[in-house]
Image (tube, grey):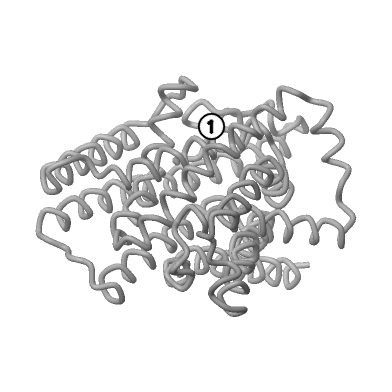
Amino acid sequence: MAGESRSERRTGLLNGFAAYGMWGLVPLFWPLLKPAGAMEILAHRMVWSLVFVAAALLVVRRWAWAGELLRQPGRLALVAVAAGVITVNWGVYIWAVNSGHVVEASLGYFINPLVTIAMGVLLLKERLRPVQWLAVGVGFAAVVVLTVGYGQPPWISLCLAFSFATYGLVKKKVNLGGVESLAAETAIQFLPALGYLLWLSAHGDASFASEGAGHAALLASTGAVTALPLVCFGAAAIRVPLSTLGLLQYLAPVFQFLLGILYFHEAMPPERWAGFALVWLALALLTWDALRTARRTARALAVAAAAATAAAVPVDTVVRQPDGVASGQEPEPAS
């Protein structure tokens, strides 16, 4: 059993590295789709993502969730909101990469955990630990420094961070699996995206049929580029602890940041370095706090198990965790 458990964790880690690695290296892909503009690429991404995930779901014959979703209008409305928000996120990201703003795009995903925490406080009335408050304050200071440096707020970063944080919040309420959620969202996106592509073709502005078979194949592959990391992420999420996934999530913006500097040769003036340093400090605080809380939770559970064994009563009636969360529950994530 121990060997099987280690094998499962190893498989989970490999899938986690694959998922975040693909997300981190995706800035290399979008420029290959030129001369297609960001809107055309976005529309193709929506259309081909649905084709890809629908084919995958047909193979595994996993369609029961669709009927349940259609019978729940409130949940379906949330899926529509998620589809709208992720459309904004995808569109801004593609435009940013193909317009020479890879570093600023990476910043959006660095600050995303901080925005998620802030939204939890403002919208869900969550209570933060002191270190989390400190991290949010440092993140706000980073945005101020970058605003001064840019001469305006880092709109690309903020748009990506807030749209993805909103997307995560809505998906949490919808509670669908990754592939199923992508299928539902792209089903909503499909007709508007297809209509836009047909409109482009009618006006002679579409590149799909005019730039050769290789270009058309690349546009069609946007479905696989969107879905494959999600499949790997799903395989990782069920095999490795949340604390490990929380650390792995930083791989994607790190890769994007390095690509922006080393491959795309984007400028990094001192004020931008200062802003990024503050963001990294905030993330280091969050990571340290999350790991510390996970260790405290593990110790509390161990004490509870020992007490339950001695007293022959259920574990979750014996002790409460140091931060007030019942011992039988998942610890509240730091991001």
Between 277 and 78, the one lying in front of the other is 78
Q: Residue at x 43, y 45 (%)?
A: 290
In this rendering, the answer to whether 308 lies above or below 111 is above
- Check disc 1 and report the residue beneath it: 321
- Residue extending farthest front: 203
Between 243 and 303, the one lying in front of the other is 243
Q: Quadrant of the N terminus?
A: bottom right
Between 311 and 281, the one lying in front of the other is 281
Q: In this view, does 178 lie to the left or right of 123?
A: right
Q: Quadrant of the C terminus?
A: top left
Residue 85 visible in the displayed image: yes
Q: Residue at x 38, y 31 (%)?
A: 118
Location of residue 111 in the rendering, given as x and y in whole percent from the top left corner: 34, 46
In this rendering, the answer to whether 155 lies above or below 101 is above
Q: Residue at x 9, y 59 (%)?
A: 270
Looking at numbered disc 1 in the image, what kind of residue is underneath it? Gln
Location of residue 327 in the rendering, given as x and y in whole percent from the top left corner: 61, 33
Q: In this view, does 243 lie to the left or right of 159?
A: right
In this rendering, the answer to whether 6 lies above or below 291 is below
Location of residue 135 in the rendering, given as x and y in whole percent from the top left corner: 29, 40
Q: Is residue 51 left or right of residue 192?
A: right
